[in-house]
Image: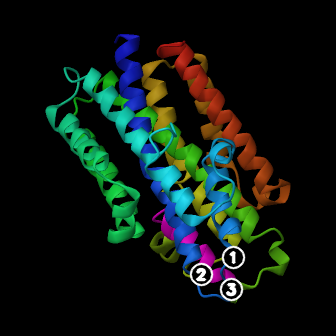
Amino acid sequence: MLSRTADNLYWMARYVERAENMARILDVSHRMSQLPASTAHTSASEWLPALIIAGQRPLYEKDHDEITAGAVIGFMALDPDNPSSIFSSIRQARENARAERNAIPSEMFECINAAWLEIKEMHYANLVDTGFRDFFDWVKDRSALFRGTTVGTMLQNEGFYFARLGTFIERADNTARLLDVKYHVLAPDEDRIDEAVDYYQWGALLRSLSAFKAYRLIYRDSIKPRNVAELLILRDEFPRSLHACYDVVHQQLDVLGPKLECARLAGEMHARLHYNRAQDITRRGLHRFLTEFINRNSALSAEIAKDFLLVA
């Protein structure tokens, strides 16, 4: 396969997943901002984590003097000058898909093209009128439709493997960032957690990752920070966990280039997730573990680019 084709398919999938992840980040901040007054934080403290998780704070602060709900949502959702906004991510995914119209089923291009045509006509006032939650759900629905179309129609060859790689590299990064920032905010000291207050906030975090019912089915207990960390890191039956993401990444790279450095790195990270234990991670420090994971995931992405894709 040509590097250009692999590059386009890899980034097409990453941008679609990034759009959904941005919607999920905004969704959890919006849910927490709607909590009862006794448990809600100030606007800045509620929306600052969204910018930090997405790595958007420096760019945001160039043009904004204060952090408000409206400004953050507008910036992360529809700002065309923000390269990681939902608007920009869908635009870039569509451009990558358009470049490979001969390599992907027509249904895939029509799916992402329809999403682009819809979001291109949206303005912040539309989001206010229809409701932010409806917009976040729209983004997640379009992403799920695109993934379903990919799995259901795309020939499962090397192009399919690169699309899958893009999806799960991006998803793993987002899950780690979201858990790291929110865990630090909600559980700086687990021994002092007020469970009556934190239940709603942890519930909002789990719902933002579609993990609330999964948590209930697995643990059948009140929400506890260590269990949340275990679910989102080590439980491979939950599809947005780090372990589940690396089940796919490791498998795809083992097919594409089992002797390459990127496959070795993926295998090493997969083994750590497969054999680690929640108590060991929290004892050594969850923030340390997640920071190291994010850095390793980024290094793996760079190695994939070096081995397979177009490198500027």
Element type where label 3 sits in the image: helix
Q: Amino acid at mark 1?
A: His
In the drawing, does residue 227 fall left or right of residue 312?
Answer: right
Q: Nearer the viewer, residue 25 or 225?
A: 25
Q: Amino acid at mark 3?
A: Val
Residues at marks 3 and 2 touching, judged by CB atoms closer than 8 Å: yes
Question: Which color scheme did the rendering employ for the protein?
Answer: rainbow
Q: Is residue 207 magenta?
A: yes
Q: Which residue is mark 2?
A: 200
Residue 304, percent from left and from top: 54, 22
Q: Which residue is mark 3?
A: 197
Q: Which residue is mark 1?
A: 41
Q: CA distance from mark 2 to mark 1?
A: 13 Å
Residue range highlighted in magenta: 197-211
Residue 184, percent from left and from top: 75, 62
Residues at marks 2 and 1 touching, judged by CB atoms closer than 8 Å: no
Q: Nearer the viewer, residue 91 or 93?
A: 91
